[in-house]
Image (cartoon, helix red, strand yellow):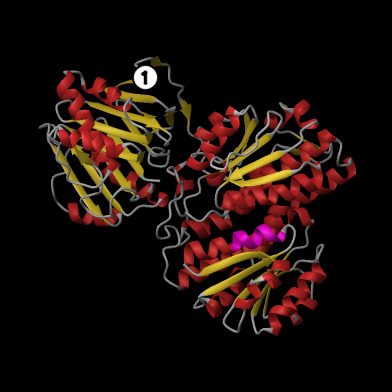
Amino acid sequence: MCGIVAYIGHREAYPIVVKGLKRLEYRGYDSAGVALLNEKKEFLVYKKTGKVSDLEASVGTQDTHAHTGMGHTRWATHGAPNDLNAHPHLSQNGEFAIIHNGIIENYASLKKALIDRGHIFKSETDTEVLIHLIEEIAKNNEVTFEEAVRMSLTQVVGAYAIVILSKTNPNYLIGARKGSPMVIGVGEGEHFIASDATPIVEYTRNVIYLNDGELAIVDNQKLTVKTIDNTIKTPYIQELEINLESIEKGGFDHFMMKEIFEQPRSILDSYRGRIHVNEATITMAGIDAFEDKLKNIKRIIIVGCGTSWHAGLVGEYLFEDFARIPVEVEYASEFRYRNPIINEDDFVIAISQSGETADTLAALELAKSKGATIFGICNVVGSSIPRMTDAGAYTHAGPEIGVASTKAFTAQVTALTLMALSIAQKRGTISTVRLRELLTELETIPAKVEKTLESNDYIKTIAAQIKDTRNALYLGRGYGFPIALEGALKLKEISYIHAEGYPAAEMKHGPIALIDEEMPVVVIATQHSNYEKVISNIQEVRARKGKVIAIATKGDEHIKEQADHVIYIPECEEAMLPLLATIPLQLLSYHIAVMRECNVDQPRNLAKSVTVE
């Protein structure tokens, strides 16, 4: 969740680190700080609560000259968000400095032991405990900087991505990870460390994704990768696929709006090269590799968090509809704690935009320990989930900077659609004619999304009328139900309006009590199965003076008599409904949030990638 950036090389470190922190702002944070190690072997440490821009303002014209430095954006866990708790943290003797993403679970016992040995702590953080521990080990064992770091990490329980500097070793830098992402950028006479590739792509396209339990050691521009137990590893250097333009706003006011409008392309890229309409076939290497097992599979378990969980619910409809396989969709955050029944013949699908979601990784570890086949759907090449799974599929949505997931969701649904249809074909539960019809429809979706985006200005007028509401209800049936959940999530996470999604039929079992003339009710009311029943639900809302906003099929004139506002989407196969119906809900949430002067790209208290439990 926190963001880390570090640099060592021939350039000025401060501008690189600060620009990198700005690139990582989407991860969510409440304070920022930098530590620079200058040629005089002095640490220059600057920390500030608030945004990176606040940090820049507080630094002002103070000395920032250094060729080695690191920076951090903190999302508070241990200790309140304030200047004192902001990273970086120094050891008691001032020899070492650290930045840290993660949680040290046994920090309390370590801290007590260090206090007993005379250590005095300035912050409430678990991170300061770790840097004091490194000092203690270095002092009492007369070991090198690297050895002290490795020895300290053997005593740590928890997750971390850390960067550590030593004042007496200005050409030396150490990074290490366990359970939190870390990427190393390899340049000409310089090296970079970051939480993800966005701060690095401007300077080098050659990167190393550090594995759990590994350290990256830069000593006089020589990079060595080792395990904590001192085994030297041969790192795999790969070329970044992203470019600088993809992480800029491109003329839009916010990343979220840019990413909403990128969905015709991201959906296309997520099925490009995988479908062959004329032959009525699908090519997905991860699925094809398990063809024999999938023909006889008894159960699919889908795990995810937040928006990815909603994509998993869409997947449940798709797999049961076409492949005729029972599906369970689990919150990854609950899955590992309720002693779930997992069999060796289960197929577990993990969905994560970042590939670093801590709860999802933990759920996969549990499933893997039980012998299940695990499959990942992920957007970030080289991240932890793709490396852990037996097979998987990248979504090719491109970098998603806005915290509220938009194009990643529709890309995930596209990948799930391809998986469901591919497995259905292998199991013989779908005819060639029907498969060709669905693939033909899928090819039309990008153009239909383009058409749906043309309603942007009209949706903005609706947003203006309901922006001051305090509560909202989203209703849907069948494939529309997960979309109702996703629409409600988008509204509450970026505009801070309380919203709930429900199956439309469940309204009578409680939520109907909330409806009055102040309550906007968004209904997925397209002309698919259960259309007449959804109309009945709308009438029940209208009878109680609720304001109805309907997402309807183009050409449906009847719905105009039932709803206060109608947002039309093109006609489509019911299975493709989530790819279209979600677009107006994203736009509605965006415009409401902007009108309420909310920080659309960086909602309060939220982080893009939740890398701690």
| Disc 1 packing (10 Å; few <14; some 14–19; many ≥20) | some
Question: At 80% from the left edge and 68% from the top edge, which residue is drawn?
Answer: 531
In the image, 478 versus 507, the foreground residue is 507
Count of numbered marks: 1
Question: At 29% from the left edge and 33% from the top edge, which residue is drawn?
Answer: 163
In the image, 24 versus 268, the foreground residue is 24
Question: At 60% from the left edge and 77% from the top edge, which residue is drawn?
Answer: 514
Q: Position of residue 549 (x, y in %)?
A: 65, 74
Q: Is residue 441 magenta?
A: no
Q: Position of residue 293 (x, y in %)?
A: 75, 28
Q: Point out the stretch of residues depicted in magenta.
A: 480-487
Q: Position of residue 415 (x, y in %)?
A: 67, 43
- SS of the residue under disc 1: strand
Q: Position of residue 196 (x, y in %)?
A: 42, 39
Q: Is residue 238 left or right of residue 103?
A: right
Question: Which quarter of the figure is the C terminus placed in?
Answer: top left
Residue linked to disc 1? 226
User: Can I make out residue 31 in this image?
Assistant: yes
Question: Which SS does the magenta portion mostly show?
Answer: helix
User: Can I make out residue 450 in this image?
Assistant: no
Q: Is residue 241 above or below residue 515?
A: above
Q: Quadrant of residue 484?
A: bottom right
In the image, 324 versus 61, the foreground residue is 324
In the image, 246 versus 530, the foreground residue is 530
Q: Is residue 483 magenta?
A: yes
Which amino acid type is marked by label 1?
Lys
Query: Residue pushed farthest left?
Result: 40
Q: Quadrant of residue 502?
A: bottom right
